[in-house]
Amino acid sequence: MPNLELLPINVAGEWRLGGGDEYQSLYPATGEPIARLRAASLADVEEAIARADVAFRTSGWAQMLPHVRAAVLHRVAALIRERAEDLAQKQRLDNGKPISETRALVASAAGTFQFFAAALETLEDTITPSRGPYVTMSVHEPMGVVAAITPWNSPIASEAQKLAPALAAGNAVVVKPAEVTPLMALELAKICEEAGVPKGIVSVLPGKGSVIGDAITKHPLVKRVSFTGGTTTGKHIAHIAADKMMPVSLELGGKSPTMVLEDADLDHAVAGVLYGIFSSSGESCIAGSRLFVARGIYDEFVTRVAEAAKNLRVGDPADERTQMGPLITAKHREGIERYVDLGVSEGGRIRTGGVRPQGAAFDKGYFYTPTILEGLTNSARITQEEIFGPVLVAMPFDSEEELIAQANDSVYALAAGVWSRDFKRAWRLGRAVQAGTVWVNTYKQFSVSTPFGGWRDSGLGREKGREGIFQYMEQKSMYWGTNEQPIPWAK
Ligand code: NDP
């Protein structure tokens, strides 16, 4: 094992070793350790939150004029850009994504801070129509200490998506990154400190979600939790939030349908379907994992997608040409393999993939081939349950009614794709499908200026968009009396 120094964590601005158990972050492409750290302990959680609360009340961060706080967030964006390559390489090592993808995630994190800095500087409270001798306003106040709990699949982007609006709103933020990918949140905390965010306003507490995440969520001083992760964990957090009467936003799982109609531009649709399911090795909440193809073009289309899937470049995440890196852990790959076996036992046929790639380059990492199954219905377990891996289930459809009924037959409703040259049909289907995001003739495109979130088991609340800052604020209505005389009732 290389000689790795123990990394400090950030307890309300104190960089020190965590009080919890020691563990390692492993490079998923080789299984080798790339960082050693000690997780936060429950005492660290208590201290971080208590000190964050003091920093919120006394550091002046919450009271800073919007354009002054925005300038700090602009500096965060600039520092991320200055260190972009180093951050992208660290994230590649931490979670095994191909370097081309981690570079894009770092750029998106910088863009998120820039966007929320601009949004903060231009955000307006409203004067509402008066219904009496008073002027009425709707204003917003920061909440205090808020928590951001993030998963392992796109660390720097998920953390920026929560940290930037929460800081813009004037809060103190406690970040709990996924246990297996602690590095990016720690880097962001360093950058925030250098950019001028006051001490104590940002904490990063790596460690087991069931212990550290749970303690953060239950803490009485934590006024909001913004969570991205699995639906089971999200529901658990929602129960705690109900007991505390605490608002939460939950970005959860998905099983998104992609619908390819007879009149689709097939070159575009093949590329979009491949990117939709196999980019990020399918470890993506919005992966287009259920493919519905019009029966008349089904064979031709699925053959083209399967041939292209065979040619995807799976391998070394450090290689700029790599399209699919390894999966996050050996355990996660085993889970995916069990799902593929289940699909076969349910009557599915493997059209391509379904195995680990062979060769010395793949021996130590957690690689898996892009996999397509067919011969299953939408009610099969592997068509209903989120696999979070590079596994696509392809199904033919005969009518629009049947297509919509099947697309909507899922506990999830996060995203959907429609491929058609007929804009009226695409409009009809896009409006009929139940999902937080619908892509028409494109897939998995993201803009920080557009709200994101899911329906049903895919979550509650929305992130991104200018209004994203308000998620981290309490609304307040103010009445300014303009009466010339005392209120008549009191006479
Ligand atoms: P988990 O729900 O297991 O974990 C997500 C985060 O929550 C991790 O930091 C985890 O810590 C923490 N956590 C776990 N248990 C608790 C708890 N009891 N209380 C508080 N925090 C807890 O999800 P995965 O890591 O498996 O991530 C994959 C899931 O995330 C998929 O279902 C995917 O769809 C979803 N996701 C959703 C996205 C969206 O925007 N809708 C985007 C990306 C992913 P630890 O690391 O220790 O487990």
Image (spheres, helix red, strand yellow):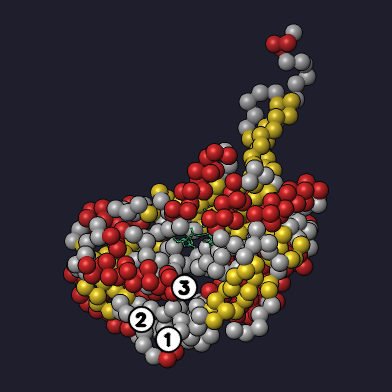
Q: Do tag 1 and tag 2 residues touch (Cβ < 8 Å)? A: yes
Tell me the kind of residue under disc 3.
Thr
Q: Which quadrant of the figure has residue 372?
A: bottom left
Where residue 167 appears, as percent x and y from the top left, is 69, 55
Q: Determine which of the numbered discs, if any, sits on residue 473 in the image.
A: none
Q: Residue at x 64, y 62 (%)?
A: 20
Q: Residue at x 52, y 67 (%)?
A: 152
In the image, residue 423 sits, relative to residue 265, either above or below, namely above
Q: Residue at x 40, y 59 (%)?
A: 254
Where residue 54 appears, as percent x and y from the top left, is 77, 48
Task: Name the foreground residue: 244 vs 256.
Answer: 244
Which SS class for mark 3? loop
Where residue 304 appears, as percent x and y from the top left, is 27, 79
In the image, residue 429 sits, relative to residue 317, either above or below, namely above
Q: Which residue appears farthest toward the top when viewing the image? A: 491
Which SS class for mark 1? helix
Task: Name the foreground residue: 459 vs 444.
Answer: 459
Q: Which residue is mark 2?
A: 356
Which SS class for mark 2? loop
**Within 10 Å of the Cα at label 2, are there few (<14), some (14-19), or many (20+) other Cα atoms?**
some
Query: Could one spot residue 103 in this view of the protein?
Result: no
Q: Which quadrant of the figure has residue 37?
A: bottom right
Q: Residue at x 42, y 86 (%)?
A: 362
Query: Could one spot residue 25 in this view of the protein?
Result: yes
Q: Which residue is mark 3?
A: 329
**Within 10 Å of the Cα at label 1, are there few (<14), some (14-19), or many (20+) other Cα atoms?**
some
Report the Cα–Cα distance between label 1 and label 3.
14 Å
In the image, residue 216 sits, relative to residue 153, either above or below, namely above
Q: Which residue appears farthest toward the bottom when viewing the image? A: 360
Q: Which residue is mark 1?
A: 362
- Label tally: 3
